[in-house]
Image (spheres, grey):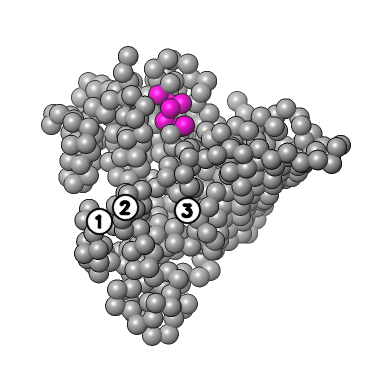
Amino acid sequence: MTTTLAVIGAGARGAAYARLAAAEGAAIVAVADPDPRRRRALAYQFDIPDEQVFADWAALAQRPRLADAAIIATPDRLHADPACALAERGYALLLEKPMATTPADAERIVRACTDNNVLLTVCHVLRYTAYTRRIKDIVDSGRIGDIVSVEHLEPVGWWHHAHSYVRGQWAVEATSSSMLLAKSSHDIDWLGHVVGRPVTRVSSFGGLYHFRPENKPAGAGTRCVSCPVERACPYSAVRIYERFLGDPVHERWPLGVLTDDVTPEGLRQALSEGPYGECVYSGHNDVVDHQVVNLEYEGGITASFTMTAFSVLDFRKTRIFGTRGSIEGDGRTVTVHDFLTDTSEAIHCAPQGDASAADGHGGADTELVRAFLTAVTTGDHSAVLSGAVETLRSHEVVWAAERSRTTGTVVSLPPRHRPL
């Protein structure tokens, strides 16, 4: 039996999940997006009939249920209304992270899915990789004893940060969400998944250090294509984007975000007219470019998380310290050191591609979609690792960390945040 899907939000992420679902045998049968270019492109790609192509998700939701499930990949602040409406119609939901940008909206989504007995899967893709499964299996087996502390790093990448969080859709918190929620909710969620205990206290520090008007180089212009010092700037949009021309993977992302005309001429026009060609020191952005989060879990386990823009874009780096051994991982290889024998074992996990969205986060996107479709098709939800309750709990840790960062306090999470 073929699983049918509706796509709500046909931008880069919605289209990517649709392609992966189709590759797994699902049928894309409806699309809703206010941008006529995006909805027409997705409708054409999947041969969706005109009567099931909508400019507004609400128009789709008013119809009798058109599909078994829906992919919701609208902008972050526009997740809750379509998620609740489609849950009430009985659609299983694959919901892009973050679940929502406020606790009230996240709780509203969870209630709608619970009340209507529909499957909710949030796109915390890091839980689904072979790499994560190996680490989780090693930890749960007791091989390194009890976890005592964890160090975890997210290297966002200098050009990726400039693309998405300075020039791009997530640059301004008021119109999207905090950097920690938009990007690193993956990592707070992943740490909780691996440690396996609830967070009791959290503190956080960070800010916008570099991408500010006062750091603009002397003589710099407003756009990279005409800037006198462009050749000496590591954040040059010309340098960042021109190198992706001719690369079919990166022409889809990030170049596909800039323009439909992925040619030297089309790219030049986009950089001359659109936001992705503006100077990174323009002052239009306000989300942080570096942040640390300190976590205390039940039982006294501690973890530190660092997010930084100032790195190569790569897989996360993690060190887990246990009473009988330790683990070091870089997204590709898990190295386990046994204290009793004083020996190490390297386990190679062979991710599919690199860590960027262009390559499906090293195969994580595929594994997520596969788990979701299996759950929808079979009714067995055990493959879904990022459901309603666990995602709500990890989001609550993110919101607590942001309260800490903005108020300078240590935030305690009350007992109701323990697993249900």
Judge whether residue 18 can be spotted in this image.
yes
Instruction: Name the spot of residue 290 as percent of width and height, x first.
Output: 55, 61
Task: State the CA–CA distance, disc 2 to disc 1.
Answer: 7 Å
Instruction: Name the spot of residue 86 as percent of width and height, x first.
Output: 32, 28
Residue drawn 43% across the image and 51% down it: 177
- Quadrant containing the N terminus is top left
Kindly check if marks 2 and 1 are in contact, taking CB atoms under 8 A apart as contact: yes
Side of 15 where 294 appears, left or right: right
- Quadrant containing the C terminus is top right
* Disc 3 residue crowd, few under 14, some 14–19, many 20+, Cα 10 Å: many
Q: Give the residue number, with chain letter if any, for mark 3.
A: 178
Q: Which mark is residue 251?
A: 2
Side of 224 where 206 appears, left or right: right
Q: Give the secondary structure at mark 1.
A: loop
- What is the magenta range? 367-373
Q: Give the residue number, with chain letter if any, for mark 1.
A: 262
Residue closest to the eye, 251 or 110: 251
Kindly check if marks 1 and 3 are in contact, taking CB atoms under 8 A apart as contact: no
Amino acid marked by disc 3: Ser
* Disc 2 residue crowd, few under 14, some 14–19, many 20+, Cα 10 Å: many
Disc with the residue nearer the chain's start (1 vs 3)? 3
Side of 128 where 226 appears, left or right: left
